[in-house]
Image: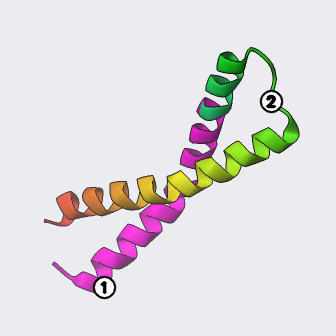
Amino acid sequence: MNTPFFIGSTIILALLLFFPVSKLMWVLSVRRLERRLGRELTDQERGGQLSRARFLTVFVVLIFSFLFNYRLLE
């Protein structure tokens, strides 16, 4: 396996997946919290959920990208 190509393709795939996955995680998180609380969230609460979703997305897309490329380039 060509290491620079593997690392580069893993990072590129993770970057391409970051925004759609973070948006999906944010929407699901906001909907779940609104349903649980029984009210709409404030802008500050939505911002907190957005930062939480982005933080978790970094790990999710890096792990997925690594495993996908590892399996693909094996």
- Report the residue at 13% width, 65% height from top: 74
Is residue 49 placed above or below 28 in the rendered structure?
A: below
Please give the range of residues in magenta: 1-28
Characterize the magenta stretch by its predominant secondary structure: helix
Residue 61 locus on image (x, y percent): 44, 56
Residue placed most toward the observer, 9 or 49: 49
Quadrant where the image shows the N terminus = bottom left
Label 1 residue SS:
helix
Give the residue pinned by disc 2.
Answer: 41
- Report the residue at 30% width, 80% height from top: 5
Residue 4 is marked as 1
Residue 47 is marked as none
Q: Quadrant of residue 7?
A: bottom left
Residue 17 locus on image (x, y percent): 50, 54
Residue placed most toward the observer, 51 or 64: 51
Residue 8 falls left or right of residue 39:
left
* Disc on the earlier residue, 1 or 2: 1
Is residue 66 placed above or below 46 in the rendered structure?
A: below
The residue type indicated by label 1 comes to Pro
Cα distance, mark 1 to mark 2?
Answer: 44 Å
Residue 54 falls left or right of residue 64:
right
Residue 11 locus on image (x, y percent): 43, 71
Is residue 12 placed above or below 59 in the rendered structure?
A: below
Q: Are marks 1 and 2 in contact (CB under 8 Å)?
A: no
Label 2 residue SS:
loop
Around disc 1, counting alpha carbons within 10 Å, would you say few (fewer than 14), some (14 to 19), or many (20 or more)? few
